[in-house]
Image (spheres, grey):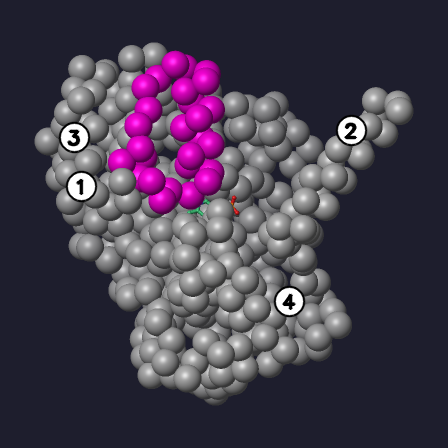
Amino acid sequence: MPTNAAFTAELQAELDQLKADRVYKTFNHLDSPQGPWVEMEGRGKVLVLSSNNYLGLSAQHEVVMAGIRGLRRFGAGTGSVRFICGTFTVHRELEAALARFVGTEAALSYVSAWNANEALTATVMREGDFVVSDALNHASIIDSIRLAKAITKCTTAVYRHADLDDLREKLAANAGAKRKLIWTDGVFSMEGAIAKLPDILQIAREHGAIVVMDDSHATGVLGRTGRGTAEHFGVLGEVDIITSTLGKALGGAAGGFVAGSAALCDYLNQRSRPQLFSNALPPTVAASALKSVEYIEANPQRVETLRENTAYFRAAITEAGFRPLPGDTPIVPIILGETRDAIAMSNALLDEGVFVTGFGFPVVPHGQARVRCQLSAAHTRADLDLAVAAFRTAGRRLGLLR
Ligand SMILES: Cc1ncc(COP(=O)(O)O)c(C=O)c1O
């Protein structure tokens, strides 16, 4: 068999195995803007409870119009990487707005938060340095640390999720390292749990470590005015480095950023490989993200609406007999046990016109399979009531509720 035919056959066999193991993902196709309701191919109008469009800004008129103006003014793309071809003024404005919003001196945008995370760790670590990471950190953080280790030969460790004693022990065991970096998510995406940020900051000070926090699920979401986990805990301006996405509350398109000192951002601009060897964010996306930040600054009540919707849904779904993981974030995982239950629930909910994704092993531990609901400020109370009614019907049908 020719080499490529054999290679393709091997891939197909692995795909078939995924199907046999019932972990093959099927994709739902949408034919409308992202929003509380979408037009789903083959299903019609469905209510979305599984989007990161936390503030409903993806289809917000002002945000869309800013993107259109950005497209008209700057064209479709950047044409090359920033240092070769020039940096657009809209990138500079966006970065100033992001820094202002998350409470740092400066910010630097990337084409995704994945890219921002990957860029950061490998660029600032060196041999003899030490990175310690929460066990439940996002895949992009995990891979960024793997990459940093391979490139720089820095030392790495993982501490048990939210276990501050374990964090202290790992730092103490690496007291001789030059730079020490603690990596944490602000909000953990599968649990909806918030990092114990004030304790982590305190531990970092005691051990001479730098704190890097990925606030992708908290930017625009946590804190009275949506500035994230630091605002939630009243420690705005105290986190050394924040990374986050533009692909969730901030318009939901794409893009990410690193925020910290001006020297850090300048250094990353000079040295980080995704910045040096990859095109910048398309200007239309930068323009929409900039408008999203300005929109939240002018309309902090959107963040309050999200908080109210979250509290309402958490109470109603508990009242309906389900067991959401406790918490305050708009990520509301409902534990169902086995993977097949989570998948069956997700399918049954879609039959009721509600789109919620099920997650099973290996994304979450065995026996902890779940459907993960995510609330948006764009949901109305009627939407949330409808979602809870769908949960009741689907839960009874599958025998998950009495
Ligand atoms: C915590 C966290 N970090 C990073 C990312 C990646 O974001 P982006 O889509 O901008 O690459 C995500 C997205 O799922 C995330 O949840």
The amino acid sitting under disc 3 is Glu
Disc with the residue nearer the chain's start (3 vs 4): 4
> Looking at the image, is mark 2 or mark 3 nearer the viewer?
2
> Looking at the image, is mark 2 or mark 4 nearer the viewer?
2
- The quadrant where residue 68 appears: bottom right
Name the element at disc 4. Answer: loop
For the residue with label 4, is its CB less than 8 Å from the closest atom of ligand 1? no
Q: Residue at x 57, y 68 (%)?
A: 344
Which span is picked out in magenta? 133-159
Residue 319, image x, y percentages: 33, 83
Name the element at disc 3. Answer: helix
The stretch drawn in magenta includes residue 136: yes
Residue located beneath label 3 in the image: 169
- The quadrant where residue 329 appears: bottom left
Disc with the residue nearer the chain's start (1 vs 2): 2
* Residue 137 at least partly seen: yes
Residue located beneath label 4 in the image: 33
